[in-house]
Image: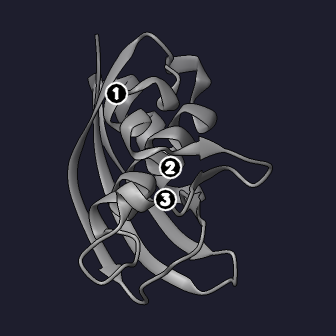
Amino acid sequence: MDILKIPFVEKVGIQHDNIGLNLPFRPDNLNHIGTTHASAIFTLAESASGEVLQKLFPEYAGKVIPVLRDSKIKFKKPTTEVVHAFSSVSDEDTKTFRTQLDKKGRALINVQVEVKDDSETVVCIGTFMWFVQRI
């Protein structure tokens, strides 16, 4: 699935660049103080967490349904710049996920995401827990 084809992701304006996913600074994504709205940044981070799972586990494409189960996010600095999401999953979590999914047909996995603006300022950090079940 192309993350960018999800209607809400399209509405927010998330796009790919040479780094990964980014969120342009746009007037329709601003909050009451003129910085990028927290919900737009959250959408970027959540989308990046889902996309990294597609890249890490291409063998499950079309065979599973992933659903976000839980998220914890901490906003650190407001921004008026383009923001970029950086996702990662530990090797241990990757191995445990594969084992559980293959054995039970369902598994949980945590994805760490850091969002930085063009000035390299950390805008937010988060953990996104995905529940994945075989179809």
Query: Circle 3 sits on which residue?
Result: 26
In primary-sequence order, the first of circles 3 and 2 is: 3
Residue lying at 53% horizontally and 23% vertically, measured from the top left: 2
Residue lying at 46% horizontally and 50% vertically, measured from the top left: 49
In primary-sequence order, the first of circles 3 and 1 is: 1
The image position of residue 7, as x and y in percent, is 34, 27
In primary-sequence order, the first of circles 1 and 2 is: 1
Q: Is residue 9 left or right of residue 122?
A: left
Residue lying at 35% horizontally and 67% vertically, measured from the top left: 30
Q: Nearer the viewer, residue 94 or 69?
A: 69
Hey, which residue is sitting farthest front in the picture? 27
Mark whose residue sits in front, 3 or 1: 3
In the rendered structure, which amino acid carries the disc numbered 3? Arg
Report the coloring of the rendering. one colour
- Residue 48 tag number: 2
Task: Identify the secondary structure beneath mark 3.
Answer: loop
On-image quarter of the C terminus: top left
Task: Identify the secondary structure beneath mark 2.
Answer: helix
Residue lying at 37% horizontally and 79% vertically, measured from the top left: 34
Please determine whether, in this image, residue 76 is positioned above or below residue 59. Answer: below
In the rendered structure, which amino acid carries the disc numbered 2? Ala
* Cα–Cα gap, marks 1 and 2: 15 Å
The image position of residue 61, as x and y in percent, is 50, 16
- Residue 7 tag number: 1
Tell me the quarter of the picture where residue 126 sits: bottom left
Task: Identify the secondary structure beneath mark 1.
Answer: helix
Hey, which residue is sitting farthest left in the picture? 69
The image position of residue 23, as x and y in percent, is 53, 56
Please determine whether, in this image, residue 27 is positioned above or below residue 52. Answer: below
Q: Is residue 2 left or right of residue 67?
A: right
